[in-house]
Image (tube, helix red, strand yellow):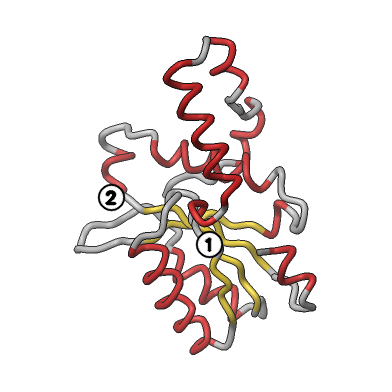
Amino acid sequence: KLKELADAGTPANKLVVSFHGIQKRRIILKGDDYYQHCYETFRLMVDRLEHTQPEDAIMTFQSRFGSEEWITPYTDDVVETLINEGHKEIVVCAPSFVVDCLETTDELGHELVKEAAEWGGNVHPVACLNTDEQWCKDFALYTYTQAEGSAQDKENLEYALEATDYDQMPPLS
């Protein structure tokens, strides 16, 4: 999507990487490592992107409901702030969702797009991975390797962060 926009003459100002949210208490009180996993995925993605700089990517969380506090920053709040700061072209991807669902097609693809337009900007959602034939083939290979592959085959599929990468992980407040 980043390359597509740049090629069309409308380069994105920011990339919002939006994960599904969970209640903050699950992380703080129960020790759930979901937030760390999201950060690891975020870093592994943005450090490998070719059409934007890592500092132009922001990790956010979506799909909160009820009265309980969820992990932040919230995707819609970040997008509104970015637009108010002058970043009018924003790409949003949701790596938590590898197939289309309400959170991607409606919450990000319709509601957030509409809200961004009302705020004076444009949100360009990235299609879910299931729309890419090569990703589907790679995922099938990954699944097969996990079920039938050797320990070395499985290890060859994994990525890991360096210990110093965690120094940049935003604290959960």
Q: What label sits on residue 127 in the rendered view?
A: 1
| Left or right, residue 129 beside residue 87 | left
At label 1, which amino acid type do we have?
A: Ala
Q: Position of residue 11 (x, y in %)?
A: 75, 72
Specify which label sits upstream in the sequence, 1 or 2.
2
Which residue is located at x 63 percent, y 25 percent? 163
Relative height, residue 16 to residue 89 (above, below): above
Q: What secondary structure is marked by label 1? A: loop
Which residue is located at x 59 percent, y 34 percent? 166
Q: Position of residue 74 (x, y in %)?
A: 42, 63
Relative height, residue 14 to residue 159 (above, below): below
| Image quarter (top left, top right, bottom left or bottom right) of the N terminus | bottom right
| Left or right, residue 10 beside residue 151 | right
* Residue depth check, mark 1 versus mark 2: number of the one nearer the observer: 1
Relative height, residue 103 to residue 146 (above, below): below
Give the residue number, with chain letter if any, for mark 2.
Answer: 23
Q: Nearer the viewer, residue 163 or 141?
A: 141
Residues packed near mark 2 inside 10 Å, few (<14), some (14 to 19) or many (20 plus):
some
